[in-house]
Image (spheres, rainbow, N blue to C red):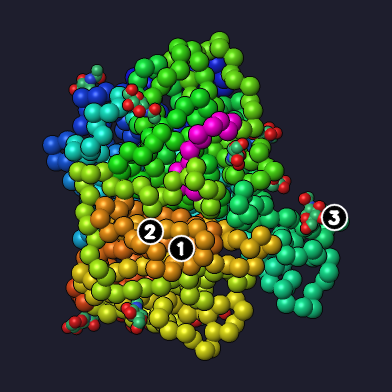
Amino acid sequence: MHLLLPTLLCLSSLLSTTSSLATAPGYGVSQNTSDPLGRLKCMDSSSCTRDPVRKVVDCSFTLRNQTRNINGTPRTMQLVNGQFPGPCIQAVLGDRINVHVVNSPSTSRHSSQNVSLHWHGLPLKGSEIYDGTPLTQCPLRQNSSMTYHFPAGTAGTHMWHSHYKLSLLDGVWGPLVVHDNNDPYLADYDEERIISVTDFANETAVSQFAHWKQFESAYYYHDNPPFDHKYDPYPGGWWIPGPDNGGQGQYYNWTYGIDGALIGVIPWVGGLINGKTHNTSNPEVIQVESGKTYRFRVISPSAFYPLEFSIDGHRFDVIAADGSSLARTGPYDYLNIHGGERYDILVNATGKPNERFWIRARTQELDRPWHQVLAILSYGNAKTTPLPKLSLYKGNVTGTRYVNCFHDIGPDCIPASQLVTHPSQAVAVPEPNIDVNLHLKFIHGPLINGIRQAEPHTPPIFSNGSLTLPGVWQCSSNTTYSGCSNIFGCNCTQVVSLEYNQQVRLTLDNLWPTTPTGVTGVHPFHLHGHKFAVLGQGYNGPYSGQPLNQINPSWRDDLIIPAGGWAVLQFTADNPGAWMGHCHMEHHLNDGMSLIFSEALDRLSGLKPPSDFPYCRDWDTTSYEGTLASEPTYAANSADF
Ligand SMILES: *[C@@H]1O[C@H](CO)[C@@H](O)[C@H](O)[C@H]1NC(C)=O
Ligand SMILES: *[C@@H]1O[C@H](CO)[C@@H](O)[C@H](O)[C@H]1NC(C)=O
Ligand SMILES: *[C@@H]1O[C@H](CO)[C@@H](O)[C@H](O)[C@H]1NC(C)=O
Ligand SMILES: *[C@@H]1O[C@H](CO)[C@@H](O)[C@H](O)[C@H]1NC(C)=O
Ligand SMILES: *[C@@H]1O[C@H](CO)[C@@H](O)[C@H](O)[C@H]1NC(C)=O
Ligand SMILES: *[C@@H]1O[C@H](CO)[C@@H](O)[C@H](O)[C@H]1NC(C)=O
Ligand SMILES: *[C@@H]1O[C@H](CO)[C@@H](O)[C@H](O)[C@H]1NC(C)=O
Ligand SMILES: *[C@@H]1O[C@H](CO)[C@@H](O)[C@H](O)[C@H]1NC(C)=O
Ligand SMILES: *[C@@H]1O[C@H](CO)[C@@H](O)[C@H](O)[C@H]1NC(C)=O
Ligand SMILES: *[C@@H]1O[C@H](CO)[C@@H](O)[C@H](O)[C@H]1NC(C)=O
Ligand SMILES: *[C@@H]1O[C@H](CO)[C@@H](O)[C@H](O)[C@H]1NC(C)=O
Ligand SMILES: *[C@@H]1O[C@H](CO)[C@@H](O)[C@H](O)[C@H]1NC(C)=O
Ligand SMILES: [Cu+2]
């Protein structure tokens, strides 16, 4: 850290502010190539330390509410160690990681603000109880603590974030990088940086979700007469309740991408790159040196909007996705990235000393070119060179190439399914033992197979060998439920039961048919506990027997299911546990677009929560200390939940 400060201070004086420097220690600065943590220095020693002898990373996270003005509007955030983005965790493949979490220590009573942390990209084999979802733990309440223990078992660029409701949107996320001394690209770059790109709203997670529910209910009532025709025209948008038009609210027109795919269902408020926006006097600056090659680890914790990443004047190669190394297929001009995805890219710093360029993350909405967030790629310690003129587009030159398109924009785009594993790591995929079809659809709410997931009331991983869900209707993907004509979707808990070591093939389609353009929006599908092979992906219509790549597919844990299209994925059920599969758009996930993979739970019979696991019984505000002091009870079918 001490090495980094002078550089940062120079840059900040250039930008005439120092106010938020303390909030993001080490993002994109300084190098030491002989360090086992690689050429990335993003970990601050006050949050995490690594013991190279024991190969253990220890982190201390304390969550507190703080008011921050990130984008021009002060708002309440829930921050780890006062940092936004949250602390960066770095480890070497094979390390153990311990994260000690304290939720809002306090001396006075507050309403409870829960949290639970998920290690996005790490399958947690043998540490399945630390996945941080409602399937593995009750939420960590305010003024209590627990420690997560898990192996750094999967190399690459990952992230950690809260999996309690939408609290990721309050700022509870950060990068997690696992270095691999056998990474096939180690010799091909000089330095590394983290670049996170995300949307960002000016109100709390709770209030954002309340707005989402308001939109949704306006949409529902619009579709179900009698309704007030002030909500017209329809389709093509929805009515946003609010103070506009004398308290009547306003009509919001949905926005679309170039081939008609739906993008802006809720209004864009703004975006951030490494927690900063160009709309303030303190944009993010990524400092580089002419002639070097950089590995940028691009991470998206986006809540709703997919983004198109690019750097003016530079092209790049894509070398890893969700941590897995890929064969080179570049150069590319634009990389699309959606919630939960990570892409590692190589960029040659071909600019001249003192030049500066815009780094962009854009929404791709037609007619909304200002819906973008910018950072600066700065050569050396440039202070005097004027910034390039702020154009709305990077530009469209002949031969422009895109990767990972959300929808069909033609031959200039390489879909994620055409990215293949690096030849040194390719493995063939056998025929499946079980087929699971997942139909993603939005009918007055986000559904999988017509089901709007009802959350279990207990963490099912502790149900002693076979999944039982007291108090909810447990249903399966393969059945059509006659009682589910409900326009909001079937209100049950969808479970896919898997036996140990089954080859599980997932066929997903995404065919919400009712937008004016006939094309739906995308959903980024995230699977816990596994990496899946991407056997195929297509843009037009459902899967209908197209050839699949079982030879050298890429391995992901998060993938966009194209708008109006499909994806075929496969994984091995070799990780007993209760794992979520879900859309990573936070509003969709929290509105029921998720399901449970109950995987070889017989191998976990007798599993008990550690003594520091959060208590499950409902929060009792009248006997605050007394309730907390009681023993947690995670036994199956217990009335305590
Ligand atoms: C780089 O890191 C290594 C290992 O931590 C340390 O021994 C060495 O002194 C560092 N070198 C520089 C130039 O900081
Ligand atoms: C919070 O926890 C600490 C330590 O367990 C305890 O001393 C304190 O009284 C608690 N605060 C409240 C408001 O319960
Ligand atoms: C933190 O902020 C949330 C709103 O985002 C609120 O519900 C909660 O009570 C706050 N907690 C504390 C300790 O102030
Ligand atoms: C919204 O769409 C309607 C037609 O569908 C159009 O009349 C109106 O001008 C649009 N409003 C905006 C702000 O684009
Ligand atoms: C937050 O953003 C929305 C959308 O841009 C805007 O309507 C609202 O006025 C903003 N709120 C505040 C307090 O700035
Ligand atoms: C970067 O430079 C290397 C060496 O000249 C070259 O092989 C590679 O193709 C370049 N990458 C891009 C994205 O242009
Ligand atoms: C933010 O930047 C965009 C350009 O991307 C610009 O159009 C917009 O006016 C800026 N907003 C503010 C509040 O400065
Ligand atoms: C880029 O330009 C080509 C040819 O002018 C055009 O067909 C294409 O739609 C443009 N792409 C974008 C994203 O504007
Ligand atoms: C669903 O049923 C089909 C046809 O009977 C079968 O092939 C498939 O494996 C079943 N899937 C699940 C998840 O049970
Ligand atoms: C858990 O299951 C095992 C057998 O699978 C049984 O022997 C044991 O009694 C069960 N424990 C509880 C608490 O039900
Ligand atoms: C779904 O069912 C649960 C009980 O199983 C109930 O608490 C909840 O209100 C229901 N939700 C809807 C939308 O019907
Ligand atoms: C925190 O979690 C407990 C247990 O699930 C629940 O009763 C309480 O309502 C939650 N609090 C908030 C603010 O969500
Ligand atoms: Cu979704």
Q: Position of residue 420 (x, y in %)?
A: 31, 48
Query: Which amino acid, mark 3?
Result: Asn
Q: Position of residue 501 (x, y in %)?
A: 20, 69
Find residue 504 and report its image quarter.
Answer: bottom left
Residue at 58% x, 84% y is 485
Image quadrant in which the N terminus is located: top left
Graded by Cα atoms within 10 Å as few (under 14), some (14 to 19) or many (20 or more), the crowding at tag 2 reads: many
Mark 3: secondary structure: helix
Query: Which amino acid, mark 1?
Result: Trp
What number is the disc on residue 245? 3
Closer to the N terminus: mark 1 or mark 2?
2
Choose between 180 and 388: the one closer to the eye.
388
Q: Position of residue 86 (x, y in %)?
A: 43, 41
Distance from the alpha carbon under mark 3 to that under mark 1: 41 Å
Mark 1: secondary structure: strand
Graded by Cα atoms within 10 Å as few (under 14), some (14 to 19) or many (20 or more), the crowding at tag 3 reads: few
> Start and end of the magenta stretch?
395-405
Closer to the N terminus: mark 3 or mark 1?
3
Q: Nearer the viewer, mark 3 or mark 1?
A: 1
Marks 2 and 1: in contact by CB < 8 Å? yes
Q: Is the residue 295 above or below the residue 95 in the image?
A: above
Q: Which residue is mark 1?
A: 566
- Residue 566 shown in magenta: no
